[in-house]
Amino acid sequence: MFFTGFLRNIFSGGFEWSEFVRQCYEIGYRSFSLVGITSFIMGLVLILQLRPTMVSFGAESMLPTTLSVSFIREIGPVITAIICAGKIASSIGAELGSMKVTEQIDAMDVSGANPMQYLVVTRVLATSLMVPLLSIMGDVIGLIGGYVALNFTDKMSFALYFHKCIAALDFTDFLPALVKSVLFGFAIGFVGCYKGYNSNKGTESVGVAANSAVVTASLWIFFIDMVIVQISTILFYGK
Amino acid sequence: MEKEKDHIEKEDLKARGKGENVIEITDLQKSFGDKKVLTDINLVVKRGENLVVLGRSGEGKSVTIQCIVGMLIPDGGSVKVFGKEVPELNDKDLKALRTKIGFLFQSAALYDSMTVKENLEFPLTRVLKLKDQADIDKRVKEALEGVGLPDAGDKMPSDLSGGMRKRIGLARTLVVNPEIMLYDEPTTGLDPITSREISELILQVQKKYKTSSIIITHDMECAKITADHIVIMEDGVYIAEGSFEELQKSDNELVKSFFSDTL
């Protein structure tokens, strides 16, 4: 019901561009530092933990390759999405839940305006756009973190490091990662909106909506990840 | 959109006329689970009339007006607004009808992420689909002046007092020139002086905008100032009706208990 309402409103005209841009700013720009710091640390820690094992196999030169493949395919998109589920899905759930409790959604509805279009469509499309962008930026920053860690013990030029990172990747690494990031973004926005929009009328419902949005969105992220990995394995890796 | 506007205007012309019923409720029933909230409610609001519905909390007064705007679907009976059966309207017609009804919520329900000006612009740009910024600014200015807060445009709802929030909520509904106003507990939570100011504002709205109104309240001062006609609810049914002066003389114990402080 909620999903069909959402679909109907995407194509019903009168798209709320200004609210969409505002949501992109709130969701994307305001999450950038958190995603950036986390990704940098993840890249750095991965290199620090991988290095002893790789050195014991004499495969130290493979560190940039290993990091880039694991980060682009899996760690970058999933870490970004989980951070966004915690920050964005909870924020949307709480905001819409609070609007429900204080009758703001009802006020929009009885005025003849369209709260679904103004509140839900804009937020879901904004997360679907911004989470992949955050994920791409997170990937780049994570690789920079890896470069910093590598230079704690070894010396490698920035150009050589990134050449090794990029050379290890091809289209089949980027495409599934991008597709799942879009789906992660959609799940984060949709679950946040659904939980907030359908919360009960009571102050405790706001907390319940926010909490439930994070838990449900996180579960959806792992489920989507599992499905996309299976599909991409069949399509691209021949197994 | 133009066709929709023409349609609404034609309906408006048909509906106008002295003493004509703008809202007719017949045998309205509504339950929530096992709890029967409304039992065969009958109510008529004439054009230009202020009807006050009095009753204790939890008697279903708010449920009645929520049925009028289609927020709740009745279990039985008829709810007609401008001759149209509200529960039978499709989404498009319900939306068109709602543009003619202003609803002031108990909490005022201001959009707290927007400034006061943006709150007032919201129905103008989304409901009336106005594009001309000069026209929008003019209407917002008039509405703010109409509620006595001409300089509040740049304030956030969190910066406003309870009385100011009610005034801005009223301005937001009036900015689209509704024909019917539904007030849900307009003076609840306000001090006696502000309550009186809001009640007088409701009266001014009736005179200036020629609105027909239902005012849900248990504030006798508000009822005395605003009511052309009063109905009193008890256990989901109306037990008495009349003018303020008529009900003041009633022998019914519950009616007496409402009016005891006003004698």
Image (cartoon, coloured by chain):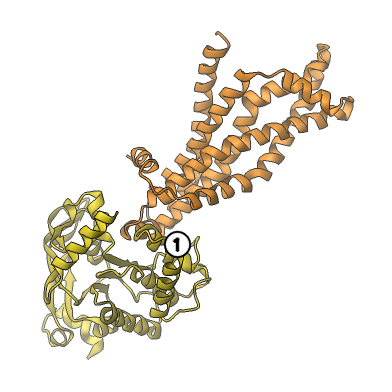
Chain colours: A orange, B yellow
Q: How many marks?
A: 1
Front position in the image: B234 or B124:
B124
B77 sits left or right of B197 in the view? left
Q: Which residue position is annotated with label 1?
A: B111
Up-down: is A52 above or below B166?
A: above
Q: Quadrant of residue B165?
A: bottom left
Up-down: is B170 above or below A217?
A: below
Q: Quadrant of residue A130?
A: top right
* Horizontal and vertical percent position of residue B50: 21, 77
Picture residue at 46% right of the left edge, 79% below the top:
B150
Front position in the image: B126 or A130:
B126
Secondary structure at numbered mark 1: loop
Front position in the image: B250 or A193:
A193
Quadrant containing the C terminus of chain A is top right
**Badge 1 amino acid:** Tyr
* Horizontal and vertical percent position of residue A110: 31, 59
Picture residue at 27% right of the left edge, 65% below the top:
B101
Q: Quadrant of residue B37?
A: bottom left
* Horizontal and vertical percent position of residue B263: 22, 91
User: Within 10 Å of the Cα at label 1, are there few (<14), some (14-19), or many (20+) other Cα atoms?
Assistant: many
B177 sits left or right of A131 in the view? left
* Horizontal and vertical percent position of residue A82: 58, 36
Picture residue at 58% right of the left edge, 34% below the top:
A132
Up-down: is A223 above or below B28?
A: above
Of all chains, the one bearing label 1 is B
Quadrant containing the N terminus of chain A is top left
